[in-house]
């Protein structure tokens, strides 16, 4: 969209994301980094399968994968400054076989979340170094693919303060406060690289609900009044900005 000119002539940009774990009526803002860069990686461990009764005749890909998972957890705990933020998560592992057959192949998929580019680069390289070393110990081979996702969502200071100042006067908004950054990713980040603006959170949890479920949970839900509140804040930001910056 950007390459096709969607930002041509755009002076400022505002966006929001409903947050099911924030109460209805709350607006969360933050200047600077708000959401992380979400990357994906795919790993294939190639061993040699065989009968479960003769493990000494195999190169057990499941055992290698288990060791690899443990080793990968050392990246954040031992390679990243404790004062910085990063995530390395294995989110899928597959090695389908009958109960008595040792698998020759394991496929794994995971995600990396970072705020700083230097940490992002380090983790990408460190994952492969650990895969290579783990497979070398067991004389196995591997395939590794790292796919970079969206960049970090970084809000501009002036525009963030602008939204924070007008939000309390928007009908339906009860609380406006600075929010903590989260490790979730957001493609709005591409816009903020090109145009000054800000991205904020709109609370969508009904206070009467006994339990709220996070995004992507099977029982995830929102109070749809949050949609109206979000639209009003965005509309107010747009109209107020146009009034304040109209040509005289």
Image (spheres, helix red, strand yellow):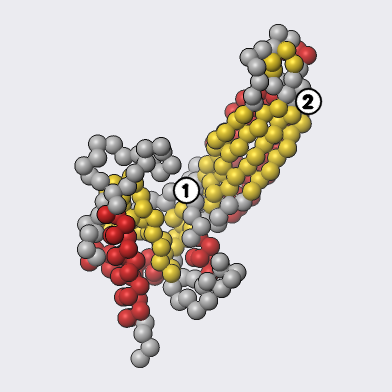
Residue 35 x, y percent position in the rendering: 46, 53
Up-down relation of residue 232 to residue 135 (above or below)? below
> On the picture, is 56 further left or further right than 82?
right
Residue at the image position 24 percent from the left and 59 percent from the top: 173
| CA neighbours of label 1 inside 10 A, class few (<14), some (14 to 19), many (20+) | some
Residue beneath disc 1: 184
In the structure shown, which secondary structural element does the residue marked by tag 1 occupy? loop
Residue 194 x, y percent position in the rendering: 53, 69
Looking at the rendering, which quadrant does residue 29 occupy?
bottom left
- In this rendered view, identify the residue nearer to me: 122 or 220: 220
Residue at the image position 61 percent from the left and 51 percent from the top: 148
Look at the numbered discs 2 and 1 and tell me whether their residues touch, using CB distance below 8 Å.
Answer: no
For the question of whether residue 13 can be seen, the reply is yes
Residue 170 x, y percent position in the rendering: 24, 65
Residue 129 x, y percent position in the rendering: 70, 38
> On the picture, is 154 further left or further right than 226?
right
Up-down relation of residue 204 to residue 228 (above or below)? above
In the structure shown, which secondary structural element does the residue marked by tag 2 occupy? loop
- In this rendered view, identify the residue nearer to me: 60 or 176: 60
Q: The N terminus lies in which quarter of the figure?
A: bottom right
Please tell me the numbered disc located at residue 239.
none
Up-down relation of residue 150 to residue 235 (above or below)? above
Q: Earlier in the sequence, mark 2 or mark 1?
A: 2
Residue at the image position 66 percent from the left and 45 percent from the top: 146
For the question of whether residue 80 can be seen, the reply is no
Q: CA distance from mark 2 to mark 1?
A: 36 Å
**Given this view, does label 2 or label 1 mark the residue nearer the observer?**
1
Residue at the image position 43 percent from the left and 73 percent from the top: 12
Residue beneath disc 2: 139
Up-down relation of residue 51 to residue 203 (above or below)? above
- In this rendered view, identify the residue nearer to me: 67 or 122: 67
| CA neighbours of label 2 inside 10 A, class few (<14), some (14 to 19), many (20+) | few
């Amino acid at each position: 969209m950007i390459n096709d000119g969607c930002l041509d002539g755009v002076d400022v940009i505002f966006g929001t994301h409903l947050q099911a774990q924030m109460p209805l009526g709350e607006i969360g803002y933050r200047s600077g980094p708000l959401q992380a860069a979400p990357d994906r990686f795919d790993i294939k461990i190639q061993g040699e399968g065989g009968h479960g009764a003769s493990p000494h005749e195999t190169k057990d890909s499941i055992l290698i994968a288990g060791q690899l998972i443990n080793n990968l957890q050392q990246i954040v705990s031992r390679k990243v400054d404790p004062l910085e933020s990063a995530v390395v998560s294995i989110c899928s592992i597959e090695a389908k076989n009958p109960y008595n057959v040792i698998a020759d192949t394991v496929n794994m998929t995971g995600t990396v979340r970072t705020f700083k580019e230097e940490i992002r680069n380090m983790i990408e390289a460190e994952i492969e170094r650990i895969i290579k070393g783990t497979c070398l110990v067991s004389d196995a081979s591997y395939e590794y693919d790292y796919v970079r996702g969206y960049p970090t969502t970084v809000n501009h200071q002036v525009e963030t303060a602008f939204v924070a100042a007008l939000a309390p006067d928007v009908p339906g908004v009860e609380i406006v406060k600075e929010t903590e950054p989260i490790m979730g990713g957001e493609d709005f980040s591409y816009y903020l690289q090109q145009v000054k603006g800000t991205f904020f959170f709109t609370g969508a949890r009904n206070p009467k609900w006994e339990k709220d479920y996070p995004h992507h949970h099977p029982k995830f839900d929102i109070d749809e009044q949050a949609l109206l509140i979000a639209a009003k804040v965005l509309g107010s930001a747009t109209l107020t900005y146009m009034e304040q910056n109209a040509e005289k």
